[in-house]
Amino acid sequence: MILAVGATGFALTRNPNTARRPWTEAGTYPDPMRRALSWALLAPNPHNRQPWLVEIEGEDEALLLCQLDRRLPETDPSDRQITIGLGAFLELFRMAAAEEGFLARIDPFPDGEAGDRLDTRPIARIRLEPGGTPDPLFVHARDRHTNRTAYDTGRRVAESSLRAIGSATVSGVDSGFINDVDTVASLRDLCWQASEIEQRTPHTWQETVDLMRIGKAAINRNPDGIALPGAIPDLLRMTGVMTQETMSDPGSLAYQQSLDLVESWARTAMAFVWLRTDTNTRIDQINAGAAYLRAALTAAGEDVAIQPMSQALQEFPEMAGPYTEIHRRLAPEGGTVQMFARLGYSRGVPLAPRWGLETRLR
């Protein structure tokens, strides 16, 4: 009994509450600009890198920049996924401002679009004006989470939910969903193939491993990247079973378990949603981020779990086969598939860690 109580007590102390504080602080700042920004930093983004950096200019203007050392050069060599994350940030900012009656004027790339990689030029200039109309999706902002658990394979996603999620897009971004059993099964295989390539390619897997935050202390210290919270990861880290070194070693138990985990994600997808653009400009990527945020908020409102499974969309050379195949299936007439996510039903997940607003201001 004493050991059981001790184990329970240990587990209760393993929550990285400091890293989750921005979720409760959202909307509590004294001025409209900071209030909207505090919501925007809860937006989904690749590997939870939170690449946004903001320069506030006066009471109602700001510049959004990309913090360049938070990009993902191995798995996202063109910064396409990072740009999508910045687009989600801008859309959530727009919604938060509208909730208070402000219209967010967003001028993307005011000094010109970046080329092959993002650079020091602003992603957008933002200006607040009176006149915003509240967006009904904003009510789900605190409930939206990326759900990285196995989904219930005994429960198909409701058709009405799929239609709502698939139609929650913006101008210039096509969307759709897939839920017939045979096609879902074949796309599960493709997801697993792409995920395995990403992990078995040393330079792409090391990028992921370097961003793993194992246990409470690591998450609170660096509330970005891939958080592994809870008593079990903490104990495995303390005993040396799960460390960044063992996660890098293909012969280790930790490496194999990470493969098993990702395969469970792919194999339990019950439906998929995708986003496509005719071209692949930086504006297209920003718009895709807005569309994905809207799909994810809609999923939250429908109590549907969602997780990007975009490994097949990554543009490093080893991924060429799955990249070609997913475009053949989802964009047979051309264009770029910008996002691909699995859907299903699952238990709730903890809040993702976030850097506080003060750390994102320059």
Image (tube, grey):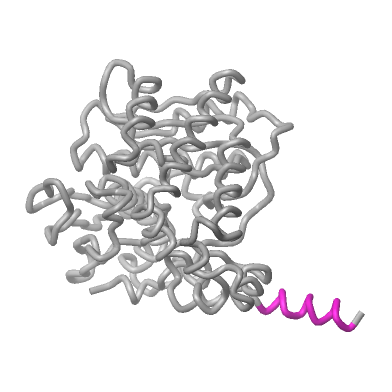
Residue 346 lies, with reference to residue 34, above or below; the image says: above
Q: Residue furthest left?
A: 111
Q: Position of residue 74 (x, y in %)?
A: 30, 52
Q: Nearer the viewer, residue 52 or 188?
A: 188
The number of numbered badges drawn on the structure is: 0
User: Which residue is at 21% across, 69% downward?
Assistant: 55
Question: Majority secondary structure of the magenta segment?
Answer: helix
Foreground residue among 360 and 188:
188
Q: Is residue 278 magenta?
A: no
Viewed as shown, does residue 155 lie left or right of 299?
right
Decide which of 166, 210 is in the foreground and name it.
210
Instruction: Using the image, determine if residue 114 lies above or below residue 212.
Output: above
Relative horizontal placement of residue 356, taking residue 6 as reference (left or right): left
The percent coordinates of residue 60 (x first, y second) are 22, 64
View extreme (top): residue: 333
Residue 147, visible in the rendered structure: no
Q: Is residue 300 at least partly visible in the picture?
A: yes
Q: Identify which residue, 34 or 124, lies in the foreground.
A: 124
Which residue shows up at 60% across the image and 36% down it? 267
In the displayed image of the protein, which residue is found farthest to the front?
251
Residue segment shown in magenta: 2-13
